[in-house]
Image (spheres, rainbow, N blue to C red):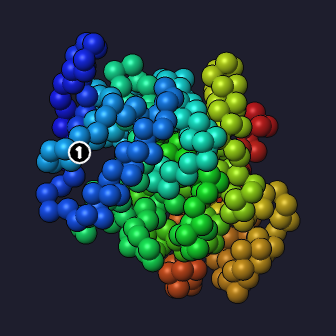
């Protein structure tokens, strides 16, 4: 539980603070974990990392006291202020989070639970990394699917890198993957990553190289940084220092944020298939179907007159069903590939214009 309060230390002026308490009925282990997290927090001193003011252990309940952040958690703050910020303001928030994470990485600290809900915002829109694993001990709400039980603890599937889900290999590189999801949350004003997909569907989609598309009006440079953060090979993901430098450059040259990533309007965008090569590399629709391993439907497409990319790119789910693609998995794969094709064709047209 978290509430606000006032703290008056000898020789210092009174200040607003946040007070986090361990829920009643906690075990000795939970108390130990709770306090060990506080001791970790106490080692950090950075403007983009939440500051520990102190710990109360001699009376009950046990309390952790931190600086007070007026605007609360970033996810709910963005939802309450949907569309209210400039792109530069949003990039400034992302830059602050990246700077806090670079500091933690330099301290050899792996967060494991980086998400917009664990970023706090003050009255000056400064974002600070918080909840250093505390949520694992405080969140025992089984109705909340955010944290899914896995061997050895609960994992926030939608925010977690595939190697961390599969092998529990948590590193700074897996934090970078999570940071990419935070970028997506910020640019979509707190939308839920992967929308209403189940956790298992998310795992399967990521395994097949699908990635989140750009949020509406998201600069192409930011979506590219997200995609870089979601590289399957963790060694290929950028370091937090590189992310800070990239965001600094974008802030210094606002014109670089003018190019918007192409998306089709609609809330539940299909995921982008990152394995699909550029549409210009295919001479025919048959070649494209072979490339996405859907060659069995060549005749279906040809007989129905879907013989050019221009026509195929306008196909709907109903069209795909009508030409005889009845397996749901195949429908989804073809539709996702068409979505990617549309994005690529739009980008080609934009360049030509």
Say left or right for 220 vs 329: right
Answer whether residue 264 is visible to the viewer in this image: no
Say left or right for 241 vs 1: right
Residue 330 in the image: state x and y as whole percent: 58, 80
Q: How many numbered tags mark residues here?
A: 1
In this rendering, the answer to whether 92 lies above or below 288 is above
Residue 6 lies in quadrant: top left
Residue drawn at x 47%, y 61% as measured from the top left: 158
Residue drawn at x 17%, y 29% as measured from the top left: 5
Query: Which residue does the numbered mark 1 point to in the structure image?
Result: 57
Say left or right for 227 vs 74: right
Q: Nearer the viewer, residue 215 or 244?
A: 244
Residue drawn at x 56%, y 74% as measured from the top left: 166
Say left or right for 121 vs 290: left
In this rendering, the answer to whether 158 lies above or below 83 is below
Residue 39 lies in quadrant: top left
Residue drawn at x 35%, y 25% as measured from the top left: 122
Residue 200 in the image: state x and y as whole percent: 46, 75
Q: Nearer the viewer, residue 337 or 255?
A: 255
The C terminus: image quadrant: top right
In this rendering, the answer to whether 245 lies above or below 167 is above
Residue 308 in the image: state x and y as whole percent: 74, 64
Asked which secondary structure carries label 1, the reply is loop
Q: Nearer the viewer, residue 245 or 37?
A: 37
Residue 164 lies in quadrant: bottom right
């Amino acid at each position: 539980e978290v509430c606000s309060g006032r703290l008056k230390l000898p020789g210092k002026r009174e200040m607003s603070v946040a007070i986090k308490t361990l829920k009643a009925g906690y075990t000795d282990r939970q108390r130990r974990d709770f306090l060990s997290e506080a001791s970790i927090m106490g080692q950090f001193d950075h403007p983009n990392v939440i500051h520990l003011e102190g710990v109360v252990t001699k009376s009950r309940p046990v309390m952790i006291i931190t600086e007070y952040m007026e605007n609360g958690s970033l996810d709910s703050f963005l939802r309450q202020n949907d569309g209210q910020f400039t792109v530069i303001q949003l990039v400034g928030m992302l830059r602050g989070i990246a700077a806090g994470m670079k500091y933690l990485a330099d301290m050899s600290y792996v967060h494991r639970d980086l998400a917009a809900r664990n970023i706090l915002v003050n009255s000056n829109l400064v974002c600070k990394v918080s909840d250093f694993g505390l949520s694992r001990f405080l969140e025992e709400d089984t109705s909340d699917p955010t944290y899914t039980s896995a061997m050895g603890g609960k994992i926030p599937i939608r925010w977690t890198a595939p190697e961390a889900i599969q092998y529990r290999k948590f590193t700074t590189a897996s934090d970078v993957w999570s940071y990419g999801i935070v970028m997506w949350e910020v640019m979509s004003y707190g939308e839920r990553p992967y929308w209403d997909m189940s956790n298992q569907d998310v795992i399967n989609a990521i395994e097949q190289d699908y990635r989140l598309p750009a949020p509406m009006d998201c600069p192409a440079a930011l979506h590219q940084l997200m995609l870089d953060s979601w590289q399957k090979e963790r060694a290929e993901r950028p370091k937090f220092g590189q992310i800070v430098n990239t965001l600094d450059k974008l802030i210094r040259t606002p014109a670089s944020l003018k190019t918007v990533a192409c998306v089709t309007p609609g809330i539940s965008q299909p995921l982008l298939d990152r394995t699909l090569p550029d549409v210009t590399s295919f001479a025919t629709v048959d070649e494209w179907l072979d490339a996405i391993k859907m060659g069995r439907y060549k005749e279906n497409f040809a007989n129905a007159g879907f013989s050019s990319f221009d026509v195929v790119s306008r196909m709907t789910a109903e069209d795909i069903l009508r030409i005889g693609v009845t397996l749901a998995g195949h429908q989804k794969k073809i539709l996702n590939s068409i979505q990617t094709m549309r994005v690529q064709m739009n980008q080609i047209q934009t360049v030509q214009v």
